[in-house]
Structure formats: C-alpha cells, structure tokens
Amino acid sequence: MAEPPPPVVASSSDRIDYTEVARRLDTIRVAPEKRRGYEREAWPHWLALDGGCLNAREKVLIRDSRRPATLDAKGCTVKSGEWIDLYTGERFTDPQMVDIDHRVPLEEAYSSGGHEWSRERRAAYANDTSDPLTLLAASREANRAKGSKGPEEWLPPKRDGICLYVADWILVKARWELSMDERERVTVGNILADCRASAAQQR
C-alpha cells in the first residue's frame, strides 16, 4: 500500500498560520481540471489499512469525538460519541447522523492530478487518517451539499468556519501535490487574503 505523504501540519486548529498556508499555496500548480473518467469505485475507501478491525471511518469518528467514543462489543464499530460539525456548528451523538468528509473530495482529487495515481495511492488518500486535515466528521446534510464542489462553488454555511476550511483545502492540495484550476486558485487566494487581513485586525 502506498504511504501517504507526511502531514503538512500537526493538526487542524482554529489558529491558522497564514504565512505557512500562503507559502504552500504558492507551490500549487495551476492547470485545467480533468473531469472525465472519474469512478468512485477506483478509490477504495473505508478500509482498515493497518490490518485491524477499525476502518478509516471508525477511526475518524473516534478521533473527532469531543468525548470518548463508545464502541461495540468487538471494538470495531462506534456506537456513540459527540461530534460538532465544523461546517454548520451542529452537534451529534449518533454516528449514523455523521458522514466522514474528504476535505478535498475524491472527484476533485481525481480531476486535480489523482487521475494519474495508482490504485494504491488512491486508497492511501481515500483512507488517510495520518493527517486530520484530509478527513473529518461532518453532518450528512453539509457533506452532501458540498458533494464534489470546491471553494469556488461551495463554502461552509457557518461563516467563522470558512477561513479554516479554505486553509485546510490549500494544505491538503499542497501535501498531495494536487493542482488547482485558475478559477479555484483565484477564489482561494482572495478568501485567504481576506481572512489574513481580518485576523491581523483582531490582534
């Protein structure tokens, strides 16, 4: 199995290092997207890559729960916990109400360079729990509204989550060496500049 690249940052945080994010943005190649040919089945997801019984979904549920998650008798499936959707601010205790969101969706990853990846690298991306920026717990409603859209087409309804979302989007793309098309690059650049200016004013 292809190993994911090392994390860009240790963890997702409300404290954004705008200098580092801007530096990473400058490393991202601008290129047209390749949309044709995407098949979700070519991106094996919710696997237990370490050989245990906890797949990537269950690991993210455990990691993102605000209190210790409760597991089934076999210790393989999350039964309860507490999750806050960073996109909406909603709180959930039933894991069935929670989706695991790929911050940069699989189809977007495909169109931004992932179409050239091996199946092993696609699986490494789709199940990447080594960096908390790649996968996160989100409400089903928000995750499905987002779909395969990028920041140029969708932003979190929770306004104070927009800056973190865009910063994480940039860091994930940089880490996995994914490209941006011109519209996407302009959009995230403008949002990042606005967020950075707003943060500077609040100091």
Image: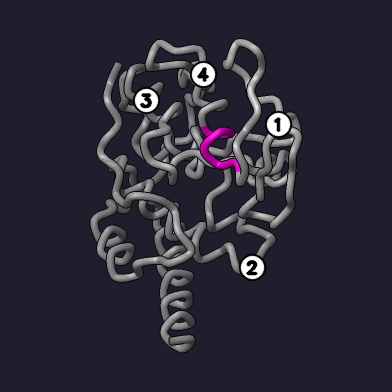
The stretch of residues the image draws in magenta is 60-65
Secondary structure beneath label 2: helix
Q: Which mark is residue 52?
A: none
- Along the polypeptide, which appears first: circle 1 or circle 2? 1
Give the x, y percent position of residue 143. 66, 42
Within-10-Å neighbours for mark 2: few <14, some 14–19, many 20+:
few
Tell me which residue sits at (41%, 84%) in the image. Answer: 200
Pointer 4: what residue?
54
How far is the residue under mark 1 from the one under mark 4?
15 Å
Q: Nearer the viewer, residue 38 or 190?
A: 190
Secondary structure beneath label 1: strand
Pointer 2: what residue?
159
Q: Is residue 12 above or below residue 82?
A: below
Within-10-Å neighbours for mark 1: few <14, some 14–19, many 20+:
many
The reply to whether callout 1 and callout 3 are in contact (CB within 8 Å) is no
Tell me which residue sits at (73%, 49%) in the image. Answer: 91
